[in-house]
Amino acid sequence: MYEIQTYLGADGLMHCTVCKEPVEAFYPKGSLLEMRKHHRQCACERKAYAEEAQYYKEKEHRELIARNKKICFEEKEMEGFTFQNVERDSGVIRIAEEYVTNWQKMKQNHMGYLFWGPVGTGKSYLAACIANALLEKEVTVKMTNFNTILNDLFAAEDKTEYIRLLNGYELLIIDDLGVERSSEYALENIFGVIDWRYRSGKPLIITTNLPLAQLKQETKIEKKRIYDRILERCIPVKIDGVSRREAMANDNMQTMKNILKI
């Protein structure tokens, strides 16, 4: 608690030695406690209490974000994927940042993204950047993939409850669509997750190595009904260029050569 030094003023009240405001006041005239005193906050106390309240508010905010990040990501490394760490400026970065800036409108219009393109070009990184930026705004986000979802569903006692909980996040990000197995069981459950999300009206972001034309021209009904729902709600954004993984591998190789002087 904030402690102040006081002095007795000419008005018969104690005053703060710093801001000079009274730290006590008389009860109103005509009341049963007339001429008795009660405590009042001076400017110094009001400032100290405001700073303390702000400190605890920020502390609670940081703790909430830390908890939600652990829930959001299955790979801890992704907690550090942010727009601030992106080395190059590009149209797709701006598109991703605009999604965060206009989150409320995107949410109201049930809109997400479909990041598609070759392997290693940064689709997952970009999706994780969006997730981290929204987590900072205390938006609940879950980033996962269908291999994990299918394994969880197989082990779940109540599959409907599992999907309901998955659908509870304000934003759901499903990474690497198309790498999961394509059995009848898998496709049925994938459709169940996508359809539930579709009907809820909540935003969905998908990343995939599959060509956009393949998603649009799919003829197998089990896959087509999945892709149709995704394409209706997720704006396709092509992510191409130099493989991010290849660039990182080259950087690591150069670092090793510098260390070993070879």
Image (cartoon, rainbow, N blue to C red):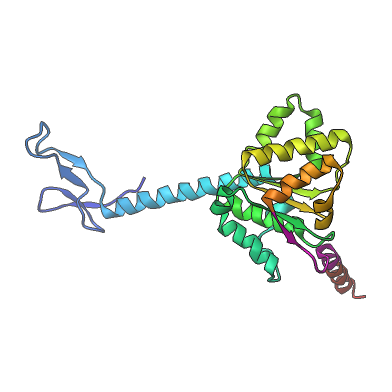
Q: x%, y% of residue 54? A: 43, 51
Residue at 65 percent across and 63 percent down: it is 95
Q: Quadrant of the N terminus?
A: top left
Residue 74 visible in the snapshot = no
Q: Which residues are magenta?
A: 235-249
Residue at 58 percent across and 49 percent down: it is 107
Q: Is residue 164 above or below residue 74?
A: above
Residue with the most extreme left position: 30
Residue 195 visible in the snapshot = yes
Magenta stretch contains residue 69: no
Residue with the most extreme right position: 262
Q: Quadrant of the C terminus?
A: bottom right
Residue at 11 percent across and 40 percent down: it is 28
Answer with the quarter of the image where residue 221 lies.
top right
Q: x%, y% of residue 115? A: 74, 57
Answer with the quarter of the image where residue 100 lies.
bottom right
Q: Nearer the viewer, residue 58 or 193?
A: 193
Q: Going by the image, does 61 lie left or right of 141?
A: left
Q: Is residue 190 above or below residue 82?
A: above
Q: Nearer the viewer, residue 43 or 167?
A: 167
Q: x%, y% of residue 42? A: 25, 51
Q: x%, y% of residue 39? A: 22, 42
Q: Going by the image, does 216 lie left or right of 62?
A: right
Residue at 76 percent across and 28 percent down: it is 156
Q: Is residue 199 above or below residue 23?
A: above
